[in-house]
Image (cartoon, coloured by chain):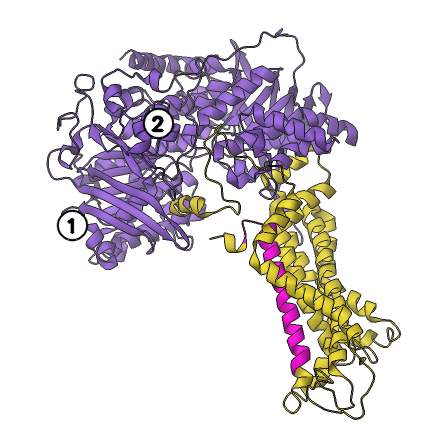
Chain colours: A purple, B yellow
Amino acid sequence: MTNLLLNGSPARPGRGQTPLLEVTDLSVTFPQRGGPAVQAVRGISYQVHKGEFLGIVGESGSGKSVSSLALMGLLPSSAVVTGSIMFGGRSLLDLNDQQLSRIRGREISMIFQDPLSALTPVYTVGDQIAEALLLHDPALTKRAAQVRAVELLTVVGIPAPERRARAFPHEFSGGMRQRAMIAMSIANDPLLIIADEPTTALDVTIQAQILEVLETAKNLTGAAVVLITHDLGVVAGHADRIAVMYAGKLVENGTTQEVFAAPHMPYTIGLLRSVPNMQTAGTERLVPLEGRPPSLTALPRGCPFAARCPISLDACHETEPVLLVHGNAGPAGMTAPGTAAPGAPVAGLAEAAHVAACHRSDEIADGVLTRPDVFPRPAPLAVAHREKDQDAQPVLTVTGLVRHFPLTKGGVFSRQIGTVRAVDGVSFSILPGQTLGLVGESGCGKSTTILEILEMTKPQAGQILIDGRDVTGLGRAELLRLRKDVQIVFQDPMAALDPRLPIGDIIGEPLTVHGVKPAARRARVAELLDLVGLDPQMADRYPHEFSGGQRQRVGIARALATNPRLVVLDEPVSALDVSIQAGVINLLEDLKEQLNLSYLFVAHDLAIVRQIADTVAVMYLGRIVEYGPVAEVFARPRHPYTQALISAAPIPDPVIERRRKRVLLQGDLPSPTEQIDGCNFRSRCPLYALLAPQDRSLCESVDPVLELHATVQTACHHVEQNELAISASLAGREEDLVL
Amino acid sequence: MSLVEETNAELGSPVVPLPPQPLGTEVTPPKKARSRGRLIWWRLTQTSRFWVGAVTIAVILAWALLGPLLYPYNATGRDPLNMGLGPTQLHWFGTNGIGQDLYAQTLVGLQKSLVIGLIAGPLGTLIAAVVGSVAGYMGGVVDRVLVWCINLLLVLPSFILLVILSPLFKGLSWVFLTVFIAGFSWMIMAQVVRSQTKSLRDRDFVKAARYMGVPMRKILGRHIIPNVASLLIIDATLGVVAAILAETSLSYFGFGIRAPDVSLGTLLAEGTSAAVTRPWLFVFPAGVLIVTLFAVSLIGDALRDAVDPTSGVNRD
C-alpha cells in the first residue's frame, strides 16, 4: 500500500459523473409483534459524489442513523429494507454479509457516536488499527501494519503516537478515542466515510478539533463524507450539501448555501430560526418550533410535519408532498448546475438541484411567504418594570468555595495518593432577577459547584450565603426554609422525574415537604402546569407519556412549586432536541420576568448562555478564569480560554462559519489530579505558545488571580497581549460579517 | 446504538395507550384525577392473570377456612373401618394407614402452611427492604455494620442452627417457626435492594427530593422502595413459596410442625413413601400445594406489571 500521506489528492466534488453512492427510494421498516410496524425510513433518495461532504440533519427518531446503518448492512435481521443502494456500481442490498464485509472498512468506513463502545477495551489502540489494516490487506506484515498504525495516529494529531499506539482505549480521553476511530476509518483509504454524530458526546473545544481532523482525513484520502448530526452548526462549516430528514423522509436537499440561505421547507426554516446563534443571541427572542415528530408506528395521513407547521393547508393533511424543485432560482450564483425545471419531480437525474418536500415551497421559494411569515418571532419579552435595586442583597453569594476529593489507593489500609481539585476557590454572586451563566468543558467543576450549593452543608473551605444567610450551622427547620428558596432543574428530564409517580405528585412533592394540604397542593399543581404551558388535566399522567420538552417543563414546574428565589438550571436544554430547545429557553426567560427569579445557568452551549445570561463565569479546572457581563465577555473575551471556547462553538451560518478565524486549543483538559505550578491553563494556552520566554516564566511560576479589566474579571497575566491578539481576530470576524 | 433507542422510544408502549400529543393541544382528559393506588388497582384489574390467580387463591382460602365446617370428619379422628382406603364418597381424599381422613388433614395442613407462608414470605421481604434500603441510602458506618450482619447470617447454616436450637423451642408454637423462616430468608434480597438503592441514590429525582428537603424516611418510602417494588413483590411471592417449602422440609425432619399439628409439609412427608402404593396420600396434598403456589405466583406477576408499567411484559 502506498503511503497515505502521498496518495490523497483532494479533488473537489465533481458533479455530473456517476455518483459514488446512489440511494434510491430506500425504506427501512421494523415489523413488530402485535402492533403496527415502525417505519423508520420511508423512501429516501440521495447521491454522494466522490470527495463530497454530505450532512444529514434531523432530530432523534428521524431515521438518519437507520438509513446509514442500512448502507453498511448493519441493521438487525428483523429489519425490512427495500429500494436500492448503488455503491461504485454494485448494489449493496444484493450482497451477502461476506461480500459486504469486504466493502465495510475498506471502501466504506464508519465513525460512531460513542468512541468508547466502538473500541474494544482489551486490545491496544495500535493493535486495533493494525487489525483493520491486516483484515483488508493480507499481504501486509504485522510489523508494517503497526508502523502504519503509528503513522495514522500521527495524521489524526495524537501526540506521542508510538507510545499511544500501545495504550488501551480507557487510557485515552473522549476526544483522543474519536481521533483513533477516525484513524481506523481512514486506514484503508476508504471511498466513503460515514460519521454518525461523531462529536455529540464531546466538548465544544474537542468538537472543533475533531471536525478539523475529519476535514483533514477527507482531504488526505479524497473520500466522500456523510456526516449525520442534529447540530446545524456542525454541518454549516464543513458540508457541501445538506439533506434534512424528518419522520423517515428527506424533506429538503440542497447545497449548504442554498439550504441555509433560502430554505424551502417550513421544517428547515423552523430549525434554522430556532437555533440560538452566537452572533444574534441575547438581542432577540428565539423562535420556538413546538410539538414533536409523529410516532413512526402511526404516521398521520398527509405531510408528517403538518401538525407542527404554522402554514399548513388542508392539502397538507391529505397528501404527503414529494421532493420537488421549487422556484426559479435562488440568489444569483447559488443555483446548482444541474438545474431542473421548477415543479419537475426528481427522478434521480436532477438530484443536484435544490429540492424540498412541501406543498407551499413554491410560495416560499418565490418570496411570497418569507421566513418570518412561516415562523414569526415571538413578541419581545414583556419586561416587568420592577424597581431594579442595584444595592439589593445578592440571592446567592459564593466565596472561595473549595471541594477537593481525596484519591485513595489500597483496600484495607487505604492511603491518600492525590487530590482531585474539583472546585478550587470559586467566588461569584447573583443579584435578584439576574442570571449567571456558568460555562466550561465537562470536568471543569461546574456540576460539583452547584451540588455543593444545593447540599447546603459546610463547604471544605469558603462560604455559601443564600439571601445573606450562611448555610453552615443552620438548624433543620431553618435549612428547610432556606431550601424553599433554592430549587434545581436537571439536565435529563427523564432521569429527574420519578418514573413511578404521576407528574401531579412529582410537581407537588416540594409542597408536601412544607406541609401543604392536599387540596391546596392540587390547586397549586394545576396553576404551575398552566404556568409552564401544559394542560392542568395532565396531572395524573406518568412521565413516560410526555415528550422530552414537556418533561423538562414538568421539571421546571416542580422547581417553581415553592416560589423559589433562585433556580439552578443544570444544562436544562442540552438533552433536548434542537427544535424543542427554543421553546424551553423562551419559557425560562418568561418565567424569570414574571416571577422575578434568579437563575444559575450551567451550560456548555455558549449560544444559549449568551441568549439567557446577564453575567457569565467561565470555569477551567475548578477555577473561574473570566467573570463579567455577558455582552462584554462575548464581544471582547480577554482570557485565551474564553476566546477558544467562543471560537470553537459552531455558528449555524455557513458564510460566517467558513470564514471566521478559530483559536483551536491543543489537547484535552488535563487531569484535575495533576498539581500544576503557575497557571493551570498553560498546557493548552494558545497565547502561552506565542509568548516571549520572560513572559512565559510568569505563567510557569505564578498562579494568576481574577483581576478587574474594565467590567470583566480575568485570571490571566497577559491580558494586554491577549487583547492585541483578539483585536486581530475580531477584525477578521467583523470583515466576515460584512461579507 | 441510536437505532435501538429510536425504535425503543416507539416500542415502549405505555400501559395506558395515549397518542402523542403536540404541546398545548387539548386532550380528552380522564374524568377524575386518579390517585396512584387507584391507578395500580385499575391496571391490576385489566390483567387476566391477576383474576385467575386471585380467584384461585380466594377459593383456596375459603375452602381452607370453611371446608372443615362442612365436612363430618376431623383431622385427628380415626375411622377404624376404613383404613388405607382410596378416595370414596365417605372419605373424599381417602384415608391413611391408621384411618385418619386425608381430606380433613389436607384442609388443616393447608391452613397451617398458608398461614406460615403468607406471614414468613412478606416478613422476610419487609426486613430485606428496610435493611437494604437503609444500608444503601445511608452508606458509611451504618452500611458497613448492616452488610456485616447480612454476611454473618448468610454464612450461618440456618438448618443446623434450628436443629441445635430445637430442644429449646420445643414448647413454642408454629409462630416461632414462622419468625425463624423469615429471619433467615431476607439476606440475599437485602443485598439486592442495597445495591439498587446505591444506584438510585445518585439518580436525579432522588437528588431533587433531597435538595427539596424531603426527609430520608420519605425518600425511601416514596422514591426508593417503589422503584425496587417489582423486585420486592416478586421476592415476597417467591418468599411465600420458599417459606412453605422450608416449612415442609423442616417438618419432614421433625423440626418444624409436630404432632398433633399437621401441615402440608408433614402430610407430604408421610405421603412420599406411599406415593406409588397409595398415591392419594401424596397426590392430593401435593396437588393442593402446587395449585396454591401457582396462584400466588400469578398474583405476584400481575402486581409487578401494575406497580411498574415499564417492567415485565410491557418491556420489549
Quarter-wise, where is residue A428 in the image? top right
Magenta region, main secondary structure: helix
* Point 53% across, 47% down: residue: B15
Relative placement, left or right, of A482 versus A323 is: right
Amino acid of disc 1: Arg
Marks 1 and 2 in Cβ contact (< 8 Å)? no
Q: Is residue B291 magenta?
A: yes
Eyeballing the image, is B258 above or below A519?
A: below
Camera-side residue: B71 or B301? B71
Q: Which residue is mark 2?
A: A233
For this rendering, which residue is in front, B15 or A130? B15
Stretch in magenta: B283-311
Q: Mark 1 to mark 2: distance in Å?
A: 34 Å
The residue mark sitting in front, 1 or 2, is 1
Dot 1: what SS? strand
Residue drawn at x 73%, y 49% is B141
Where residue A212 sits, quadrant-wise, is top left
**Disc nearer the start of the sequence (1/2):** 1
Where is residue B214? Give x, y as percent.
71, 36
Residue that numbered label 1 is attached to = A90
Position of residue B49 in the picture relative to residue A337 (left or right): right
Give the residue type that dot 2 points to.
Answer: Gly
